[in-house]
Image (cartoon, rainbow, N blue to C red):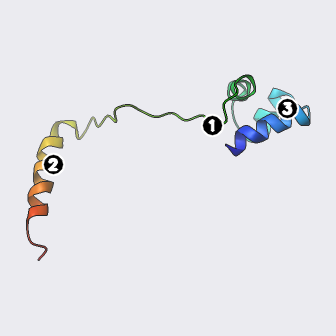
Amino acid sequence: METIARTRREHFVKGQTIKEIARDLKVSRNTVRKVLRSGETSFEYERAVQRRPKLGQWTNELERLLSANAAKASR
């Protein structure tokens, strides 16, 4: 969020170019353009389903083992 505010301030108040802002903030020029063109205050990406390629086939077995372990006494 600070990057978005700083990007807008650099461009609209200080008059820096997109290339200068991208260089200073170490982000791509496309990201700077996206921030300046949109009215968004934050950009977040949230994955709908978390993939687990290595654990995928074992999730049911792991859940069973964890529930069995939780039922046992602590000592």
* Cβ atoms at labels 3 and 2 below 8 Å apart: no
Residue type at mark 2 is Glu
Between label 2 and label 1, give the one nearer the viewer.
1
Say whether residue 23 is left or right of residue 44.
Answer: right
Q: Quadrant of the N terminus?
A: top right
Residue type at mark 3 is His
Disc nearer the start of the sequence (3/2): 3
In terms of depth relative to the viewer, which is nearer, 54 or 49?
49
Crowdedness near tag 2: few (<14), some (14–19) or many (≥20) residues, C-alpha within 10 Å: few
The residue to which callout 3 is attached is: 11
Say whether residue 8 is left or right of residue 70.
Answer: right
The residue to which callout 2 is attached is: 63
Q: Residue at x 75, y 27 (%)?
A: 36
Q: CA distance from mark 3 to mark 2?
A: 52 Å
Q: Secondary structure at mark 1?
A: loop
Disc nearer the start of the sequence (2/1): 1
Image coordinates of residue 31 in percent, x first then y, are 68, 28
> Residue 59 is drawn in which quadrant?
top left
The residue to which callout 1 is attached is: 42
How many numbered badges does the structure rendering display?
A: 3
Q: Residue at x 25, y 39 (%)?
A: 54
- Outermost residue, right direction? 14
Q: Secondary structure at mark 2?
A: helix
Q: Residue at x 46, y 34 (%)?
A: 46
Q: CA distance from mark 2 to mark 1?
A: 36 Å
